[in-house]
Amino acid sequence: MNKKQKKILIRIIISAALLIILHFIPVSGIPRFLLYLIPYGVIGYDILKKAWKGILNRQVFDENFLMAVATLGALALGLLKTGDYEEAVAVMLFYQIGELFQSYAVGKSRRNISELMDIRPDYANIEDADGNLTRVDPDEVAIGTVIVINPGEKVPLDGIVENGKSSLNTSALTGESVPRDVGPGDEIFSGCINMNSVLRIRTTKEFGESTVSKVLDLVENASSRKSKSENFISRFARWYTPVVVCCALALALLPPLVRLLMSLPPEWGEWIYRALTFLVISCPCALVISIPLTFFAGIGGAGKEGILVKGSNYLEALSKTGTVVFDKTGTLTMGVFDVVDVHHSSLDRQALLEYAALAECASSHPIGMSIKKAWGKPLDMSRVGKVEEIGGNGVVVEIDGRQVAAGNSRLMRSLSVEPIECRTAGTIVHMAINGEYAGHFVIADVVKPDAKEAIAALKRSGVRRTVMLTGDGKAVAEQVAAELGIDQVWSNLLPGDKVTKVEELLAEKPEKEMLAFVGDGINDAPVLGRADLGIAMGAMGSDAAIEAADVVLMDDNPLKISKSIRIARKCMRIVYQNIILALCVKAVCLVLGALGIANMWLAVFADVGVMIIAVLNAIRALFVSKL
Amino acid sequence: MKKTYKIEVDCANCANKMEDAAKKVPGVADVTVNFMAQKMIVDFSEGADPASTMKQVVSACKKVEDDCEIYL
């Protein structure tokens, strides 16, 4: 509990005790009124003050005003008629208990979230010539400085490992609990925690540009865009309270006047009491407090899972997703090429692979890299003689005095070698040695292990249509789509075509459904921006993606897409539950109050009770790890 | 220019009210109040003096939510 809450708790205890004591003191008339003013003042002075300030600042109709009018009215009624002041004090008392409970519960869950968002590193260690470490502000570290990260410390800046091997806990950034192993040459991101041994890294970015700053910026700026439900509530609150006050006024004045006209006793006291009860019931706190809280909690909970949602409107849109469009490379597939097969080899597979690797030794093309990776052993460069690159087709290299050609079928034909065409989908690298065909490699992008499950999970969570767009060839695209169970594929697309396709899909879908585009943020920023909802994956370290997307998945696990939809659905469910609960209970109690069945005690329980239930329900939106 | 301020506010709705009030202050281009992080991020318009603008922001916020606290 903070200071404010403790103070209110003390006031609640004092005024409750006074109320009980006064109940047994036999005084009447003015002294009784004055005595009851003491607990009323203790518990309610700040509400009165706020109501008064509200009037001065022309923010008249808020919950403080309602409470102040209702309780002051009840006191006046007691003074003039009934001599009952307990109700007025009790209403104030329960109202404050409800507020205290609410602020305590919210504060507790808020801290729960903000601790997780606390990824800002406090210092960086710089080593001097004697090996002594000095702590400096990460803001002051220039690019290219070598910094030391001890086990247990946060990585303060993005950089490349110079020496040391360790595991990094990336869960604060990605929600992923499996640690990542890093060694010299690996790029590491700020915000991770170094787990087992000392790392020395050379920084590649300033603090302001580092991953941790970007993520913090994103997290703190979330929620600036409001959802329709929130806008509805704030519009609703603006109209609701004045309307309620007018109704209460009518309830206090009209029936007695009508009774006077019918020459019945007007019963002013009774009707004013009913009007005051009406005011207490009508307090809209349950809605105004719980709806924004649900969104804050939903965004917070998603953040804990490595899903950053940029505003509550996007959470709302996510919950209505009906079509998900995927980019293939890097989203459903790893985006790294692997040699998946060797066909028609006239040599031993390993021997052919070694030749291919030697031929590609100077290549930095992804295909060449994949062959070198598949070979995986050091290459004896002295065996390689003349290298001739034939742009776009392949290479012809002299190895051990033999002419080795590696490339596509065009290259083969230009050397008058007839290649054997391959029926497997993928990129094919043909080999010819001394002018004779030696077989070919099938190189393909590998589908992410969770991709199939991710598509199935999307279907389960109510996504009607899944579409894949890719720049790759038809055969590859269709094979991947069939394997993953994707409904529709478009292949051979240039980046610009993707935007056009997404626009077509947008025009096809029903109005109320949302279309989400999932990409890895590399050259698909325009598409991310064009879809109803842009989701960027594996965004750690990719600024363009973070800028362009509405929802950012920190790691590249496609299962997170369906998870984020489930989180959004849960959040919206809670919002609707709270709206319905609050409005129904209020409506029933308002009618009961107007009919004189409900008294002020019931009124305050209805108000505070609904508020507490709604707030507890809203906090549920935080707990999303098991969704 | 963006600056981040620590704030103290009890309810999510009050945070939204503060956001709306602060947005209307001259010299303020945009404001985000993050209730969960208890932070206010103010984007000042070009040429605005943060110190004097923030004074106005504080008083605008106090008007809509008496209990709020902004640590300058």
Image: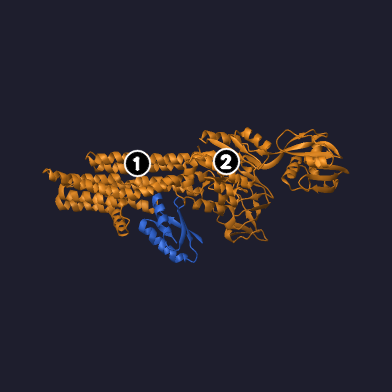
Chain colours: A orange, B blue
Is residue A528 among what the camera can see?
yes
Q: Mark 2 falls on what kind of element? A: strand
Is B14 situated left or right of A190 in this image? left
> At x 36% / y 51%, what residue is drawn?
A6
x, y percent for residue B37: 47, 52
Q: Nearer the viewer, residue A50 or A149?
A: A50
Identify which amino acid the numbered label 2 is placed on: Val
Q: Is residue A65 above or below residue A399?
A: below
The dot on residue A255 is: none
Q: Chain of mark 2?
A: A
The residue to which callout 1 is attached is A582
Q: Is residue A8 above or below residue A420?
A: below
Give the foreground label among 2 and 1.
2
Identify which amino acid the numbered label 1 is placed on: Ala
> At x 39% / y 39%, what residue is drawn?
A577
Q: Chain of mark 1?
A: A
| CB under 8 Å between discs 2 and 1 | no
Is A61 situated left or right of A440 in this image? left
Is A38 situated left or right of A202 in this image? left
In space, the residues marked 2 and 1 are separated at their CA atoms by 38 Å
x, y percent for residue A536: 57, 46
The residue to which callout 2 is attached is A325
